[in-house]
Structure formats: structure tokens, C-alpha cells
Amino acid sequence: IYILAIESSCDDTSAAVMQNDITLSNVVATQKIHEEYGGVVPELASRAHQQNIVPVIHQALAKAKIDKNQLSAIAFTRGPGLMGSLLVGTSFAKSMALGLQIPLIEVNHMQAHILAHFIKEEDFNSPGFPFLALTISGGHTQIVLVRDYFDMEILGETLDDAVGEAFDKTAKIIGLPYPGGPLVDKLAQNGNAHAFPFPKPKVKGLDFSFSGLKTSILYFIQRETAKNPNFIEEHKEDICASIQYTIIEILMSKLKKAVKETGIKQIAIGGGVSANSGIRKALKNAESELGWTTYIPKFEYCTDNAAMIGIVGYLKYREEIFSDQSISAKPRYVIP
Ligand code: ATP
Ligand code: FE
């Protein structure tokens, strides 16, 4: 089975070719244009997708050494994401499937972040069912109980900002360029995580909240720089380490609660924030201290990419779960 997968939910245009559960190619065109605005500008994102989509698909097919006539189906991200961005991938996928007379497969982006764990890779074991998935990205923060490929239940999610946003917005407060997450991580490595204690929010159940943290950091920085204008420069590493520590404490305490409530100790993480060295360390510690088994896929499968859409395409193809030409993009699309 050869699946061409298209991902265009946010600011990366990506196309992948899968041969069953193996990635033959996974091309990502990142849009640089948003950096100067300090965040993704939807209108610019959809225009860039429009420009990128044909070359990216060409490259994906060429790298995989597959002709379009060999394709078995086309999978695409239907949502969640930005409407203008989703429309580009959705329209393209529909037209191409129609032209080639092959099945069309819609994919939920958040389900794909989780099912990315089933892309076959050397040195990577996929989790067995059931497991808990922690999806941490620029737009989402979710704990999902995964009973089977297409049997998932969201146990908790953020009530306001996503964890990636918490990183990026606090990074902005201390003057770091967008996206600030990776920079906070880097600076944190040389800082004292206990230098500045920030309050942790009290949120019911397994839900999260990160907007309060952002506000308390803003007030803290304003207060300190009023006393010492060079405060940020002098304490940048300690500030970053303290922010990162607090965010990871919030994530880990909810994960521990989820493990306690479900009795499931298999934890799979995904989303761009899985790159964070602090969360990786915390998960490794939980393996030895709490007996968890943790799964972290290759970084290229953590951030937005089409291979994760392709693996869902393959899993749906096997079960003949196809879509028809009446399908449309769905910006607010919760895991079905
Ligand atoms: P979504 O998948 O919800 O639509 P997205 O596509 O914006 O959101 P990703 O590409 O998965 O999200 O992840 C991007 C986020 O990951 C950014 O907020 C970025 O700051 C954060 N990030 C990347 N690397 C790190 C790191 N090492 N430490 C902390 N955050 C990081
Ligand atoms: Fe994503």
C-alpha cells in the first residue's frame, strides 16, 4: 500500500509517502515568514501553503521514488487547525484523489500526533494498548487514554493556553525571539530551577491551565526590572530554568494523577514540546522511580509532519475507512 499524506493545519506544509507503516519520504517546508511577527499569521500561512504545496508533494514523491499512479490513497489533515491553512491541503487532496480515481482519507491531526507512535522505525518499539498519550504542542495539551487505534478518550486538556504557548509567551516576556520554547530549554540547562519559585495553578481533575503562570511571570519580571533594569540579562538562565521547572511540574503531576486513576503505566508523548530536555529527563526518571514505560518518537514525528497523517491513512486504509468528495475542512475537530 502506498499512501500520499498531506499536512497543512498550521504553518508547516508537509507531504509524505508511506509504504504501509514505513516512511519513504517526509518533506516539511517550514514557513519562516512568521518569525518577524512573533507568532503565526493565518492569512500569510495559507498563502505560503498555496505556494509550497505543489513543490512539497513533488519532492515527497521523488524522494520516495514513487510515481503518482502507484498511489493507493491520499490522506490529508481535516482538522483541527487554521481554516485557511486546512483548506489548501483539503482541496488539494480532494482534487488529486478525484483525478487519480483513488480513495480519499480524512485524518484528525491530534489523533495523528498519537498514532505517530506506530510508524515503524528501527530502535523504536510502539506502545501496546492501552496506553496514555500526553500531547504537548504549540496549540494543544492533552492527556488521552488510548484503548485502540481508533478508540481514544480525552481525559484532560488545557482550559486556556497550550504548553508550547506557555513557553513561547513567557520567552517573549524576557525578550527571546519566536518560537521561544527551544531557547528557554537551552538557557535552562545552565540555570538554577529553584531560583525563582512560580505558583502552580490548582485545576480540577486532569485538565491544565497555563495562562496564570504567564501572568505571574509577567508581573514578576515587571517588579524585578523596576528595581533593577538589568534583571533579565543578569538572571536569564535562572529565569528560564525556573519557568521550565514549573511547567514540567505541572505536566508531571497531572500525568501521575492519570496513571493513578487508570492504572496504566505506559506513557507516550508527542507534539513539539516533547523535544524539551526537561520533560525527557522527568520521564526517564519516572521509568526508574515509578516503573513507567515511556515512548518518545523521533523528533521529526513529534512536530507537525505528514508521515503521522500517512500512518493514520494506512491504518484507515486497512479498515477501508474512506471519505467522499463532500468532505470539508474542520478547524475545530476534536479526536473522534
Ligand atoms: P499543534 O500541533 O497543536 O497544531 P504546533 O504545530 O504549533 O501546534 P508543534 O510544531 O508540535 O506545534 O510544536 C511547536 C511548539 O513546540 C512551539 O510552541 C515551540 O516553542 C515548542 N518547542 C519546540 N522545542 C521545544 C523545546 N525544546 N522546549 C520547549 N518547547 C519547545
Ligand atoms: Fe501539531
Image (cartoon, helix red, strand yellow):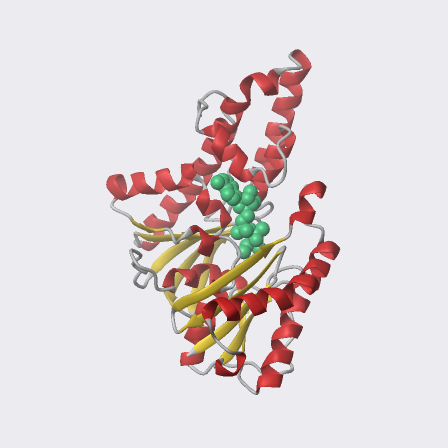
Q: Is residue 279 visible?
A: yes
- Position above or below: 3 against 286: below
- Position above or below: 301 against 178: below
> Is residue 301 or residue 240 the one in the foreground?
301
Task: Give the residue furthest to the top.
Answer: 227
Q: Is residue 77 visible?
A: no
Residue 297 at x, y percent in the picture: 39, 54
In the shown orientation, is residue 29 left or right of residue 21? Answer: right
Residue at 64% from the left image edge and 12% from the top image edge: 228
Residue at 45% from the left image edge and 56% from the top image edge: 301
Residue 103 at x, y percent in the picture: 53, 83
> Is residue 240 or residue 122 the one in the foreground?
122
* Total marks in image: 0
In the shown orientation, is residue 216 left or right of residue 290? Answer: right
Residue 309 at x, y percent in the picture: 50, 66
Task: Give the residue furthest to the right.
Answer: 43
In the shown orientation, is residue 50 left or right of residue 170? Answer: right
Residue 231 at x, y percent in the picture: 61, 16
The quadrant of the picture occupied by the N terminus is: bottom left
> Is residue 48 or residue 174 the one in the foreground?
48
Residue at 70% from the left image edge and 64% from the top image edge: 50
Residue at 34% from the left image edge and 60% from the top image edge: 121
Task: Give the residue furthest to the bottom.
Answer: 101
